């Protein structure tokens, strides 16, 4: 078994696709119209096995969860084999980091937010 997908509640399908595909460099795996304004949208880092299911918020409760799905903690961890190159590419694509890269016992890390408020770690594990 493996973890296939994780739902990420977003305000708009197309804005989320644009960020994850164009700024983050993720592959758009699937974008299927399910009718009634609902779509099945999967994105993933190139070569990644686990996908993000981008789910458009439609209720007030879902809209309130946008960017707060992990209680303001970092909820997503993007591993890089070439931290410096990926950090520079993301910055050039307009991704805003909350901090400069720092070195921890487990590796190099820098926190950023997506445009919807979700906190991510870009990290290179030293183990």
Image (cartoon, rainbow, N blue to C red):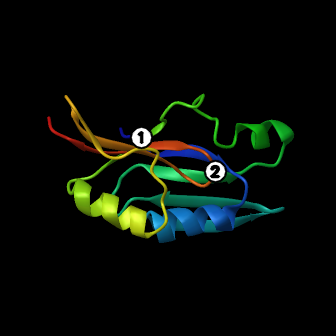
> 126 and 111: which one is in front?
111
Q: How many marks?
A: 2
User: Going 45% across and 44% down the picture, which residue do you hit?
Assistant: 120
Q: Quick check: 13 left or right of 93?
A: right
Where in the figure is residue 38, as x and y percent of width and height? Answer: 76, 59
The quarter of the displayed image where residue 76 is located: top left
User: Going 41% across and 69% down the picture, which residue do you hit?
Assistant: 92
- Residue 116 - label: 2
> 16 and 42: which one is in front?
16
Q: Secondary structure at mark 1?
A: loop
Q: Quick check: 8 left or right of 75?
A: right
User: Going 68% across and 62% down the picture, which residue do you hit?
Assistant: 13
Q: Is residue 22 above or below residue 47?
A: below
Where in the figure is residue 30, as x and y percent of width and height? Answer: 54, 66
Name the residue carrying label 1. Answer: 3
Where in the figure is residue 83, as x and y percent of width and height? Answer: 25, 54
Q: Is residue 47 visible?
A: no
Mark 1 nearby-residue class (10 Å; few <14, some 14–19, many ≥20): few
Q: Is residue 65 visible?
A: yes
Q: Is residue 11 above or below residue 59?
A: below
Judged by depth in the image, the label closer to the viewer, 1 or 2, is: 2
The quarter of the displayed image where residue 63 is located: top right
User: Going 57% across and 52% down the picture, which residue do you hit?
Assistant: 53
């Amino acid at each position: 078994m493996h973890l296939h997908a994780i739902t990420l509640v977003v305000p708009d399908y197309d804005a989320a696709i644009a960020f994850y595909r164009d700024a983050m460099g993720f592959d758009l795996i699937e974008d299927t119209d399910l009718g009634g304004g609902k779509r099945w949208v999967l994105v993933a880092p190139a070569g990644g096995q686990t996908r993000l299911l981008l789910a458009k918020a439609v209720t007030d409760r879902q809209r309130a969860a946008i960017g707060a799905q992990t209680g303001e903690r970092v909820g997503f961890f993007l591993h890089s084999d070439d931290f410096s190159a990926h950090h520079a590419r993301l910055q050039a694509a307009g991704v805003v980091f909350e901090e400069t890269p720092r070195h921890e016992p487990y590796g190099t890390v820098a926190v950023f937010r997506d445009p919807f408020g979700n906190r991510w770690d870009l990290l290179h594990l030293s183990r």
